[in-house]
Structures are given as structure tokens and as C-alpha cells.
Amino acid sequence: MQRCCSGSGRAHTQAPSPATATAATTAPGQQRAAEGAGEERRAAQGAGSPPAPAHRLGQRPPAPANTFFHPRTRAMGPLRRKSHLLPLVAVVLVSCPAQSSAPGSPATFGPVFEDQPLSLLFPEESTEEKVTLACRARASPPATYRWKMNGTEMKLEPGSRHQLVGGNLVIMNPTKAQDAGVYQCLASNPVGTVVSREAVLRFGFLQEFSKEERDPVKTHEGWGVMLPCNPPAHYPGLSYRWLLNEFPNFIPTDGRHFVSQTTGNLYIARTNASDLGNYSCLATSHMDFSTKSVFSKFAQLNLAAEDPRLFAPSIKARFPAETYALVGQQVTLECFAFGNPVPRIKWRKVDGSLSPQWATAEPTLQIPRVSFEDEGTYECEAENSKGRDSVQGRIIVQAQPEWLKVISDMEADIGSSLRWGCAAAGKPRPTVRWLRNGEPLASQHSLFLPALAPDFRLNPVRRLIPAARGGEVIIPCQPRSAPKAVVLWSKGTEILVNGSRVTVTPDGTLIIRNISRSDEGKYTCFAENFMGKANSTGILSVRDATKITLAPSSADINLGDNLTLQCHASHDPTMDLTFIWTLDDFPIDSDKPGGHYRRSSVKETVGDLTILNAQLRHGGKYTCMAQTVVDSASKEATVLVRGPPGPPGGVVVRDIGDTTVQLSWSRGFDNHSPIAKYTLQARTPSSGKWKQVRTNPANIEGNAETAQVLGLTPWTDYEFRVIASNILGTGEPSGPSSKIRTKEAAPSVAPSGLSGGGGAPGELIVNWTPMSREYQNGDGFGYLLSFRRQGSASWQTAQVPGADAQYFVYSNDSVRPYTPFEVKIRSYNRRGNGPESLTALVYSAEEEPRVAPTKVWAKGVSSSEMNVTWDPVQQDMNGILLGYEIRYWKAGDKEAAADRVRTAGLDTSARVTDLHPNTKYHVTVRAYNRAGPGPASPSTSATTMKPPPRRPPDNISWTFSSSSLSIRWDPVVPLRNESAVTGYKMLYQNDLHLTPTLHLTTKNWIEIAVPEDIGHALVQIRTTGPGGDGTPAEVHIVRNGGTSMMVENSAVCPAAHSGTILSHSMAMLILIGYLEL
């Protein structure tokens, strides 16, 4: 038996039969192609072909075996210029494979594509060494593969650069000269041949900019200017940015600057001094796995003297008169004008209304997914206070072919004529051609088909056919037969004929309408042709109809509210009832964790839906559908969610002054509650935070779309945004405006921190705090200083350029030491001078004191210290005395080697420490001020004491009574070079009181009162005398210990209490030192 099967290319059209195919579309330069889609032909399965594989969610189904992809059905990339669109062609492939139907014989079927080649964009500089074009088909017997390049079959020989791996074509070391072109895969077996879609292999590249230096560009400040990019050769298209002076200082995309993404040229609507500098064009090529950027040579922009005149707009960047695009593509129109003031751009559709979502004041108009409704003439208008200019152009929308009528598998009687019809739509109108086994089909062709008796084994009538009372049921009768069988239907023994409720269609399908209980019973389909007859029977079971008994009600709620939409239904109790809710025809997932929807589960007939914390996106048409396996019923309700306004759009800054600008914006969505007011905010690069600004009018009403911003800082970069509010709250802010800089003005704030003093003789040094950028108000910033001797009538002035300057030195030999000067300061820039500060009193440089201290006296007080006293020095005219400097040196040393110590104030005595014992020192005292020390006093001498004995007390013993502790030790006898011992110090600490106590004695024993419950104590004993305190002896005392223990420098203690006692040994030493006599 032979069967004739067919496939069809389509786009967006639902196929009327299971055998469908989808035409591939690809965008040049974007390395992608839409996958073909298809499902297994039901009739083919009846002939013994293997079933189609199951496809899980997210997997790509195989393309049908007979899908052909013509290159001219391919969608073009985003267009800005008139495209060279070739006539679009729709292609239908017809294959007539022979299929075996003998019982027990293996299934035989023609190739069915499972994977087809995709168009590729391969970077010329890629390190990849090969390109793979995929091709795989199911077939029985298995398919063999061939490839065509540019319509010519390729010779795939072993060892060549082109290798066949399975069905895939692998190109080794691809080059543009040899391998760029159109490829097709052909899969064949004895049943037939299928041809894949065309895959285009292109090569992407981006050359370097010219190495030649670029000529400088010169214009007047205030005029517009264009800097050409002149990009190098490339494919595909590029994106462009411009650098000023250095990387990454990119030119901002604000209302004054514009970078054309068509030509790469930089346009400046009106130049100012900040535009001076060197410019470089950065061109970037983007490919799927490769990105490359190149820089042009820098071109210098020079500005001549400012031209203060105002100019009407003149559009310099124009979109073409005709722009062609395919449905679904993004269309971009560019428009930018020179002028002074900077022109404002407005877009409109001349022969229709412009969609609010595309309304913009930017230099580009973007339509993300163009449709036929967007076709028409568009106008760009540039306007300022001096006039306007406009340009018009037309968008012409075309469409790739899509199937209006597709072919499907068919069976024909022997000797009959077969007519397959197909129809395709597109713009321009597509042409249609037919192919069989990959070859063009002749105008007439005969098909030879075998005969087959009716057979219901693969497609029987359903055994049980449920239907709802009052509804409609459709029972197909589709036996496999050749020629086509004659079909009759019966209910029981009654033959059914067409009537008001019962219809038997020409293809044998039984339709019963307005079903009642009396329609229940057995229904049999009889099929007969000259080869034989067969029948198949099913039972019709009539169930109660499903009805909505409580429908949801429309509601009007506020943002954040909760709402329950009720929906109750009745149904046949023998069947399960399910509720399905949709919002604007999209299913609602009420089981999503953390979602806003909850479903009622009280009983089967209740399907209430609760909306929690309603958001604006939850408004719309809700549909409740109650559904069983046989029928369904539905009701609708509308929910309106009111909330704060949406963000305003199109924020534009114009009429820029030094402290004011004019802001304009377009209204956002009011979200069903009228906008009550607008709030304007601004931010600067220095703060980075948005702050509310003063406006005119002070309160901006909800119907306003423009306002003046007041109180700005001159010569400062600003961004602005707009926030709308209504009775329900404050909405999201608009996007930030383009960054602008306010005009320059004279400084408005005086410098602060005026002070001074110090320096060399004859100098006056004045200091101040440098003014930050936000207070400079303009370029060419500096400081003007005025000063005069106190009591003088005339002022002297000095100019200090530079914003970072923070001091000035006036030098004149006639300036006497510590002379008071009146000083004031103001700042300036190229727009003028700012206000003066308050007058401050600053003294000239001091000179050293002229008088030396008198009656200097020194005495050693220990082995390492001496006291020094003197009479004070009177203040003189050379400066302010800060204190005294004591210089001391050993007898026999030179005074130049003297050590020095200074008092912190005007004290007339000091203790000098860290001296050597038993050593004679010479001492002088000098007064000092900020200029330095004055003359030295007459020197005096002092000798330090001998050092204390180094040997600690030893042979320590103790005795406990009920309330006292008596301790004895051997007297310490000093050596000849040690100072006398005048007494002893004992530091005592017990385990009940962690703070040690100091005891003094002139004898070699001591008795102290102690509590009876004291069992442990730590004692340190040392000598004291004129030379200071000696080395301590440390003893750990235990009541009832039986013997005495003495430990020098450390303690030996029982483990139970050692941690507590020893942890304070250092504290005891410190306390002894503090309490030295």
C-alpha cells in the first residue's frame, strides 16, 4: 500500500489537523533560527510507523519530515534604513512514501527531522577551530545524509575540511572566503527524501580605526557641533559611545549630547566651556560568544569666543524617509537638533495617534514590537524659544509568510484525483511552490494506492461516551480503509438519519445536540467498501449539566486590600468538579508559595477565590469556570484596584539658568484615583541622595505637567525626577532626567576659617578653609585677600588663584614681630567676585623672647629626679609666651648635648626625671614662644641621690594570733654607693580583699590586725630612703603553715589559691610605686 503524506510551512497559524509544521524564521546577525514544530501524523501511525516521542515541558519537539525552509522567509534584523527585502516565498513539501502494512512485517516510514541546522554568525577572530551544523532524522530503514551549499551538493570526502559526523556537517578551520553561504541537509531512505530548512553561515568581524590623526574641530561656544565617528569596516552592526579626554569618562546621553547608533556620530546641540577637550569614538561589536571594542584616534574640540545669540532649532540627525521592518521587530528612529536654547524633541504620528508607551521627548523613538497598526508617517519636531524644525518619515511594515490553509495527511481512492490546497499570507504577497522528496513537483502527478477493507483496530469508537444534559456530543468514526468507506450510524437497532438534533457529517462523525436522558444507549458505526465491512460500538451516558449557582461579583478595592470572589456550582454527583480561575484569560496559580491568591477548600461545590494584599496588577477580568470531564460553566467579574499613581514619564529639563530650571513631564497612570499633586526632587554627584526642591508654583497640582525649580546651586550637575501622589499615597518616582549643569554665577558665599600667625620674621601668614566645589559657582576660581595693620586706614590686596589654595604669605622686612593685622577674604570666579568675610585679627610672625628667667634653683630629690624652680619672665612685644624650656646635662659634658624638657604652661617649677643616680647635672632655663626659645638663664647645678639598696629584705618570718599578724625580717644595710635606709614599705593583700593595703614602718618588723578567717595572704616588703624604694621581697603567708617561706621576684603558692593571689602581684607593685614616700 502507498500513502501520500504532506507537510506545510507556517507561522502563527493553528493547523487544522495533527500533521503540521512551522516555517523557520531567522534574524541575520543574531545567530538564531526558530525551531520547526510538528506532531506525529495520526494516519501514519495507523500504517505502522513508530509513535512520536513524548516531549516534556521545556524540550523541543522534532520538526516534521517534510518541512522546507526557504531563505526568503527569514526575518530581517532591526531596521533603520530601507531594507532590500526579497519577495517572500512559502514552500510546501509533498512526499509519498510507501509503507508496509503486512501483519508482522517491520514498520517502514520515511525520514522525520528531529534536529535541523541553525544559522550561525562566526567571529573571524574566534579561537574555535570548527563549526557544526546539526542534522538528525528518524527513519526506518535509517536515513543517509547529504549536504548542499548554495544549492550545490557538497563532496564530503575523508580527510577534507568538511566532515559528516552522523548527520551533522562539521567544518574545520572555517574561513569566510570558502565557507560563508547557505547550507541544507538532505535525509533519505528508500521511502523518500526530506530537505531541511536553510541555515546561513556568516562571518562577523570588526577592523581597527584608521591610524591617521584626526583633524581638530573648531566652533564658537554656544553653537552646535557634530564629530564624525567614521567607523571601520564591520559585520554585523555596532553600538557606539564617545570618550572625553580619557577612559572611562564617557559622554552622558543627556538632552545636550546625542550619539547616533546608526552612524556613530556625536552631536552637541549647544556647546559650552565644559565641552573643550579630546574626543574618541568607541565602537563595539556584540556576538553571542564574542565582544570586541575599538577606539578611534582622539579629535580635539576647540571653542572660539562665546556667541550669546539665540538660534532656532536645526535638525541634524534625521531618520530616513522610508523605514522597512517586519512584524514583531524593534524599530528605532533618530532625531536630534542644534539650537540655543537646547531644543526640545517631540514625536507624533501624522496619520494616527502615537501609543502613550512610546511617547517620549528623547532623540530616539523606539517601537519594541512593531505591528501593522504602527505603519504610517511619523514626525519629529524640535522646538525652542526661537522657533521649530521638523522632519517626517514613513514606517512600512512587512510580514513573513504564514499559513492560512495547510495540508495534512490524506487517503485517496484508487483511480481518483487528489487535490491538496494550501494558502499563505504575507507582505509582500508570498509565492508558493511544491516539492516531492526534495525535488520540484511537476504540474501533474499520479499517485498509486493499494486497497484496504475498513479496520477499526487502531481507531475504535470510544467505549464510554459521557455527555451533559442539554449539551452537545461529537462521536468520530474514523476506520482505516481504501477506498474511503461508506459510514452509517445506529442507536440500538435504529438507523440514525440527519434531523434537527442528530447530524452525520460527510466524514462519518455523529453529532447529537440538546442531549436528554432518552439519548442514552449503544451507538454503532458501520463502515463498508468493496473490500469488506466493519463496525465499532460505544455507550452514550447522559449526566447532569454543570451550572454556576453563585457567580462572582465585580468589586472596586484599594491597593493592599483583601477580597474574596465567590463562585459556587452544581454538577452531576457521579463526576468530579474542578474550579479554574483566570485573570484576563490567563490561569491563576493559587498554590504558589507566598502568592497573593488562595482557593477555598470547604466543599467540592465551592470555588471561592481570595485575593490577599491586592496589587495593581491584580485588577482585571476574573473568570470562574466550573468544569467536569463532560462540560463546563463560567461566569465573569471585574475587579478594579485603586492605588497610588504610577511613575511620570519623559522628564525633560529646559530653560537652564544659574539657580533655576524648567521641568516638564508626562502624566503616568493615575491607577483609578486622580493625581492630587506632584513633588520634584534633585540630586547632585557629590551627595548622591534625592532631595525635595523648591518650586514655582510651590504646590504643583495634579493636572500640571511643568514647573520651575528654584534655589539651585550655580555651576552644579543635577538630575531631576518627579513623584505623583493621590489620596491613596505616593507613587513610584519617574526615571531620572538627563544630567544637566546649571549656569555659572559669581560666588555667593564668603570663605570661612580665616586665621593665621607664625612664619619667619617679617612675615604675615593668613590661612582659610578652601571652598568646596558646590560653593565655587563657576570656573576660574580663586581668592581675594585684603589686609592692613590694625589702626591703618588703607588696605592692601592680594589675589590667590586656585580653588585648593588655603594660605597666603605676606613678607616685608618692615613688619614688626607680633603685629596685629585686620584681614578679610572673598572668593571670585570668571563671573565676578563673591561677598567678603567678616574681619579677623591675625598677628605677624613672632620672634624669640628677649629676656632670660632669673633665680634658677635645682635640687636632687631621688636617685633619678631633681626639682627645678625659677622666677617668671614678663611678657614682651615679640610674641605670646607659651612656657619654659629646661636644659640639663652631666657635669663634664658639653651644653650642646643637653637634654630638654618643656613646661605645658607658665609654671615656674618642674620635676626632671629619668636621671642617673649620684650624678651632678648643670641646668639652665629659657622662656619660649612660637618662634622658639629665648636666651638662657645663668646655669645652676644639682646632684642626684645615691640609688636605693639592691638587696631586698630577707629571712622573713611571721606569726599569727587570733586577730593580728606579726612579720619580721633582717635589717637591710646599704653599701657605700647606696643611699641610706630610712624605713620599710609593706604591701599586704589577703584572699578576701583583692585590693592591697600599704603599711609603713621605720623598724624591721610590723604588726597588723587581720580577721580570724584569713588563711592566705601575699606580702611585699621593700626598703625606702632618700634614693627611693628598693627591690621588693615577696612572701606568700599561710595560716598554720608550720614554716615561713620567702620568694624573691616571684611567689611559690599552693595550687588551690595561686591563681587568685598571684593575679594581683603586679597590681601590688604598681601601688607601691604610686605610694612611694
Image (tube, grey):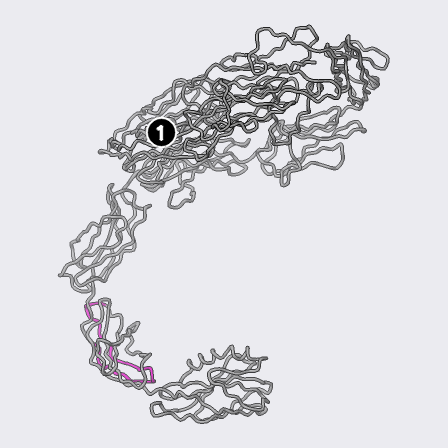
Asked if 475 appears above or below 247 in the picture, the reply is above
- Tell me if 5 is positioned left or right of 701 in this view: right
Badge 1: few (under 14), some or many (20 or more) residues near its Cα, within 10 Å? many
Asked if 572 appears above or below 774 in the picture, the reply is above
Is 862 contained in the magenta span?
yes
Q: Residue at x 65, y 14 (%)?
A: 4
x, y (%) of residue 429? Answer: 51, 12
Front residue of this view, candidates 517 and 352 = 517
- Tell me if 902 is positioned left or right of 558 in this view: left
x, y (%) of residue 596? Answer: 63, 38
The answer to which quarter of the image holds residue 936 is bottom left
Front residue of this view, candidates 980 and 671 = 980
The answer to which quarter of the image holds residue 259 is top left
Count of numbered circles in the view: 1
- Tell me if 849 is positioned left or right of 677 in this view: left
| Quadrant including the N terminus | top right
Question: Which residue lies most toward the left here?
Answer: 814
Asked if 495 appears above or below 938 in the picture, the reply is above
Q: Is residue 847 visible?
A: yes
Is 500 contained in the magenta span?
no
Asked if 24 appears above or below 929 in the picture, the reply is above
Q: Is residue 328 visible?
A: no
Q: What amino acid does circle 1 point to?
A: Gly
The residue range painted magenta reads: 852-879
> Which residue corresponds to mark 1?
264
Q: Considering the numbered disc 1 on the image, is that residue within a helix, a strand or a loop?
A: loop
